[in-house]
Amino acid sequence: MAKVLVSDEARKEFSTLRRAFDEVNTQLQTKFSQEPEPIEWDFYRKGIGSGIVDMYKEAYDKYKPKFDALLVELKEAEEKSLQESARLEKEIIDVQEISKKLSTMTADEYFEKHPELKKKFDDEIRNDNW
């Protein structure tokens, strides 16, 4: 991404943003990736009383599976997002490469990289759809 930025000021701003992102990401990975300690319900029953602790335990047991399911969905969405980011980064590089060569590129060179378009155009010409 830094290669796309033109001015020095934009590169500095991007660098600052990247460092801030890395710091937050590191904190999230270290603090929130650890499994929480199991709740010791008996300990709280002794200190607070069983009525209120049982009420919290019931609510916890009710919502824990839903929360766990949301975490699974989140992990799947994160994986899809990372895959899409990688695909887009590759596409950006391809577009930059093509834009550099565009003024001197021949149709054959372009179709060599995009055979599906050559097939599509050939089919259209063959069927008189041009």
Image (cartoon, helix red, strand yellow):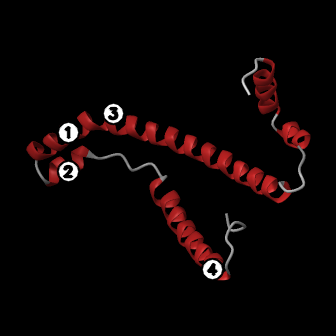
State the SS at label 4.
helix
> Which residue lies most toward the top here?
127
Q: Residue at x 90, y 46 (%)?
A: 106
Q: Earlier in the sequence, mark 4 or mark 3?
A: 4
Q: CA distance from mark 4 to mark 3?
A: 45 Å
The residue that disc 2 covers is 44
Classed neighbour count for the residue bearing mark 3: other residues with Cα under 10 Å, few (<14), some (14–19), many (≥20): few
Q: Residue at x 65, y 48 (%)?
A: 88
- The alpha-carbon separation of the residues under discs 4 and 1 comes to 49 Å
Q: Amino acid at mark 2?
A: Tyr
In the rendered image, residue 45, in percent from the top left (x then y), is placed at: 16, 47
* Pointer 2 or 3: first along the chain: 2
Q: Tell me the mark number nearer the camera, choosing from 2 and 3.
A: 3
The mark found on residue 65 in the picture is: 3
Residue that label 4 marks: 12
Rendering coords of residue 55 (x, y %): 13, 41
Please give left or right for residue 122 compared with residue 14 in the image.
right
- Which residue, given by chain and number where applicable, does mark 1 sit on? 59
Q: Amino acid at mark 1?
A: Ala
On the image, which quarter does residue 60 sit in? Answer: top left
Residue 6 x, y percent position in the rendering: 69, 74
Of labels 4 and 3, the one closer to you: 4
Q: Mark 3 and mark 1: span between their CA atoms?
A: 11 Å
* Sooner in the amino-acid sequence: mark 4 or mark 1: 4
**C-alpha separation, residue under disc 4 versus residue under disc 2:** 51 Å
Q: Are marks 4 and 1 in contact (CB under 8 Å)?
A: no
Instruction: Give the Cα separation between the discs numbered 1 and 2.
Output: 15 Å
Q: Residue at x 80, y 26 (%)?
A: 119
